[in-house]
Amino acid sequence: ALNILYLNVNNFTGSIVAVGCNDMQNFDIGYNHFSGSAPAMNCTREFYALYQYRINNNHFTGELPDLGKLGNGENWYFYTFYMEHNNISGPFPNKVICNAMSLNQIMLHHNQLSGTINNTCFEGMTNVGWFDISHNMISGPVPDSVSAVETQYVYMNNNNFSGTFPDIDWSRSRMRTLDLSYNHIE
């Protein structure tokens, strides 16, 4: 069965409806001209390890696709999640992002994501090096759990966050960059 699919940096056009994922570990179709809905992962058994899901810099629209069973919402392994520079809409993918173990890079910037982020979403993010959800329409308060994050680079700018700034113990934080500019935070 296919484990790795790299079609990135080409001139592919058209749409991809679904991808078989029982053994898929790396899926990268970034920097093409694909359009339509983002590809779903069509699994027939429990699915716990998709290390890379990269659909960045295409022309995908609509809501985030079904990414398989994902262990029925339990912790599952995911390393990179690149979806930036598309027109993906719908709510922030709390189930996908907040339950992933070993997640290192989250790139969801420059889309049309909305809704809120679970207040406890950042609590398990011990390996994330880069978290970028800038240039979306995500609203609500900045999660209190951002203060516990081990992430080095957090970009949440150009959204609709509101409320008060979370209390962060900077002496214990590994964070090097926190960008909350262009929001409605007090």
Image (cartoon, helix red, strand yellow):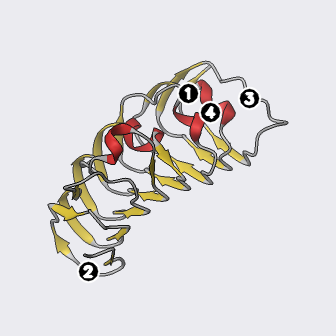
- Gap between marks 3 and 1, in whole Å? 12 Å
First along the sequence among labels 4 and 2? 2
Q: How many marks?
A: 4
- Most foreground residue, 15 or 110: 15
How far apart marks 1 and 2 lie (CA) works out to 38 Å
Callout 4 environment at 10 Å: few (<14), some (14 to 19), or many (20+)? Answer: many
Q: Earlier in the sequence, mark 4 or mark 3?
A: 4
- Marked residue nearer the N-terminal end (3 or 2): 2
Q: What residue type is labelled 4?
A: Val
Q: Is mark 1 on a helix, strand or loop?
A: loop
Above or below, 177 against 52 in this view is above
Which circle's residue, 3 or 1, is located before the other in the chain? Answer: 1
Which residue is tagged 3? 168
From mark 4 to mark 1, how far is it between C-alphas?
A: 7 Å
Mark yes or no: residue 133 visible. no
Picture coordinates of residue 86, whole percent (x, y): 32, 56
Residue corresponding to mark 2 = 11
* Residue under the point 65% across and 23% down: 165
In the picture of the structure, the residue carrying the numbered disc 1 is: 142
